[in-house]
Image (spheres, rainbow, N blue to C red):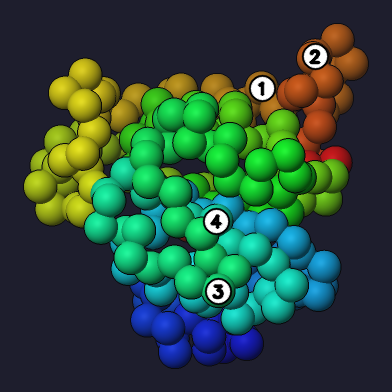
């Protein structure tokens, strides 16, 4: 168990409790982020709940401003020193633009609605703002295979989505996002926006992308 997981346990985030073969979500993050602790300036996390993971990032990155985005207005109570909460949908470009406005991002975490359409929209808007060498992580990707309607009443925030929201996930859409970037790495004619991916690592329930 590393320093990041220890912080997660202290703050009570479920990122420390999600464990596969003895490796937690936070153990995976630390593999990539430990060398960057002193230099990370802007972290955006989609999905706030009660702010446990935001406080974990606050303590792990001593120089960083932490931006949390959540559709549930109740999440606004969990802001604080260097932690700013934005209330709105992760599929709303205006809300996403308010996170570290005018600045590059070092780390983006999508732990939001787990709706594939939302995940793709957030990625398409926030990935261009990621600095070279920055990381974009999608969590709980097992949900991307599911019809999420049964979770509408169980998960805080889902009920705040409009009636037109597509809760029936189509994993093929997310797979295409990864496919296009994997094959663009060796295909010069692909658009630069698809050729700026340095790595895509698939972990149990997490996908980690690094920008070049």
Location of mark 1 (residue): 180
- Seen at 74% across and 24% down, the residue is 194
Q: Quadrant of the N terminus?
A: bottom right
* Secondary element type, mark 1: helix
Say above or below: 42 vs 35.
Answer: above
Mark 1 / mark 2, whichever is N-terminal: 1
Specify whether 154 is left or right of 175. left
First-in-chain label (3 vs 2): 3
Is residue 21 among what the camera can see?
Answer: no
Reading the image, the residue beneath label 2 is 190
Q: CA distance from mark 4 to mark 2?
A: 32 Å
What residue is pinned by disc 4?
A: 67
Q: Nearer the viewer, mark 4 or mark 2?
A: 4
Q: Are marks 3 and 2 in contact (CB under 8 Å)?
A: no
Q: Are marks 1 and 2 in contact (CB under 8 Å)?
A: yes
Which residue has dot 3 on it?
A: 81
Pointers 1 and 3 in contact (CB under 8 A)?
Answer: no
Task: Say which label, 4 or 2, has the lower sequence index.
Answer: 4
Q: Mark 1 vs mark 4: give the one in front.
A: 4
Residue 90: x, y in percent?
43, 37
**Disc 1 from disc 4: Cα separation:** 29 Å
Judged left or right of residue 113, residue 155 is left
User: Decide: marks 4, 3 in contact (CB < 8 A)?
Assistant: no
First along the sequence among labels 1 and 3: 3
Name which quarter of the figure residue 18 lies in. Answer: bottom left
Q: Position of residue 15 (x, y in %)?
A: 44, 70
Q: Residues within 10 Å of mark 1 (few under 14, many from 20)?
A: some
Graded by Cα atoms within 10 Å as few (under 14), some (14 to 19) or many (20 or more), the crowding at tag 4 reads: many
How far apart are the two marked residues, 3 and 2, measured between alpha carbons? 42 Å
State the residue at coordinates (44%, 89%): 10
């Amino acid at each position: 168990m590393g320093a990041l997981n220890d912080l997660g346990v202290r703050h009570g985030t479920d990122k420390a409790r999600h464990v596969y073969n003895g490796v937690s979500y936070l153990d995976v993050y630390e593999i990539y982020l430990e060398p960057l602790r002193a230099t990370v300036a802007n972290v955006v996390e989609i999905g706030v709940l009660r702010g446990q993971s935001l406080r974990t990032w606050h303590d792990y990155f001593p120089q960083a401003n932490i931006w949390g985005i959540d559709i549930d207005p109740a999440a606004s109570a969990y802001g604080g020193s260097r932690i700013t909460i934005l209330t709105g949908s992760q599929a709303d470009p205006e809300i996403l633009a308010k996170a570290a406005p005018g600045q590059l991002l070092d780390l983006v975490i999508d732990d939001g609605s787990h709706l594939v359409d939302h995940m793709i929209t957030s990625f398409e808007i926030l990935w261009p703002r990621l600095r070279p060498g920055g990381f974009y992580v999608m969590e709980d990707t097992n949900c991307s295979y599911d019809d999420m309607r049964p979770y509408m009443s169980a998960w805080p925030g889902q009920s705040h989505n409009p009636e037109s929201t597509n809760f029936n996930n189509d994993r093929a859409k997310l797979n295409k996002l990864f496919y296009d970037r994997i094959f663009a790495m060796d295909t010069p004619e692909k658009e630069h926006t698809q050729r700026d991916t340095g790595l895509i690592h698939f972990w149990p329930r997490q996908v980690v992308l690094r920008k070049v």
